[in-house]
Amino acid sequence: MRVGIVGRGRMGRALVPALAAAGHEVLPPAGRGADGRDPSGAPVDVVLLAVPDAAIADAAALICDGPLIGHLSGATPLSVFAGRSGVFSVHPLLSVTGPETDFAGSWAAVDSDSPSSASVAAVIVEALGLRPFSVADHDRAAYHAAASIAANFLITLEGAAEDLGRSAGVPREALLALARGSLENWGRVGAAEALTGPVVRGDADTVARQRAAVAERLHGELALFDALVAATERLAGRTRAHRTTDRARNADTGEPS
């Protein structure tokens, strides 16, 4: 398969070695204004648009007839292609840093408009070693927000924890071990069962002392702390209900709670 890539940023540069290693003929990444043809003027088989979301529509409009077109955006629906057929999207769910990126084993959100474009998307996914799942156009914003919470916002939270911990002489590595363990628990049993700490225990005095420390040492993040406590209280309510249900079920079956 002959692949043309539009976009010379991190994603475009990462795709070239990954697809070439799978045996595909990949042209060097082209800048914006590329039309999907190789230097001889022949159309490639597939064009991948590795450009910012706001540039996808304009980049797609310049592609000649013939190639199937896919974009790499998580938030952008297929409607961005303005009715063109033979389109798809593959959004690798990982942080892409450049040519050294290893896609293998990561997940990817995939969508397509036809059997032919679905087939090509599957080839791209297989070549990169990704694990696909489907996301429809109307779910794109929710999907991408979930990804931002899970990755970008998580780093923001850990940054706040790092700053507050530093004020008390806590090494970042100690917080890393705690955060890693919590993430692994969430991955294994889900949020309701993984939640621990003073909020789920109903320890209001401890939460109040925490808030006072944040107000004193990291005042700019006090609103964030309050919002997180409120969200954690809502999750804690579901957690308590879940555990109560489990105890009732175990009592009925005679199993230990």
Image (spheres, rainbow, N blue to C red):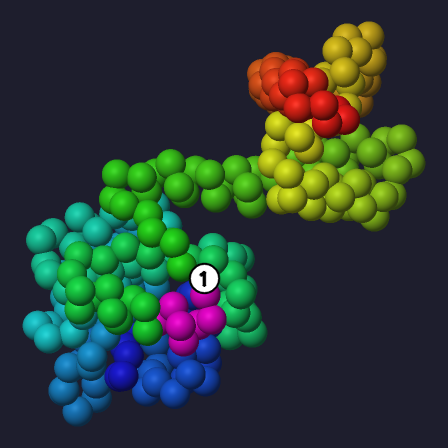
- Residue at image position (14%, 87%) is 41
**Quadrant including the N terminus:** bottom left
Pick whichever, 133 or 247, lies toward us: 247
What secondary structure is the magenta-colored segment mainly? helix
Left or right: 104 in relation to 13: right
Inspect this view and state whether residue 85 appears: yes
In the image, residue 195 sits, relative to residue 116, either above or below, namely above
Residue 8 coordinates in the image, percent (x, y): 38, 70
The quarter of the picture where residue 64 lies is bottom left
Q: Is residue 233 magenta?
A: no
- Residue at image position (34%, 76%) is 29
Pick whichever, 209 or 119, lies toward us: 119
Pick whichever, 155 or 203, lies toward us: 203
- Residue at image position (76%, 16%) is 201
Q: Disc 1 marks which residue? A: 131
Residue 238 coordinates in the image, percent (x, y): 58, 19
The quarter of the picture where residue 243 lies is top right
Disc tally is 1
Inspect this view and state whether residue 8 appears: no
In the image, residue 139 sits, relative to residue 7, either above or below, namely above
In the image, residue 20 sits, relative to residue 95, either above or below, namely below
The quarter of the picture where residue 227 lies is top right
- Residue at image position (38%, 36%) is 142
Q: Amino acid at mark 1?
A: Arg
Pick whichever, 70 or 257, lies toward us: 257
**SS assignment at label 1:** strand
Farthest residue, direction right: 169
Residue 173 coordinates in the image, percent (x, y): 83, 48
Residue 214 coordinates in the image, percent (x, y): 76, 20
Left or right: 237 in relation to 120: right
Q: Is residue 129 magenta?
A: yes
Please provide the residue range marked out in magenta: 124-130
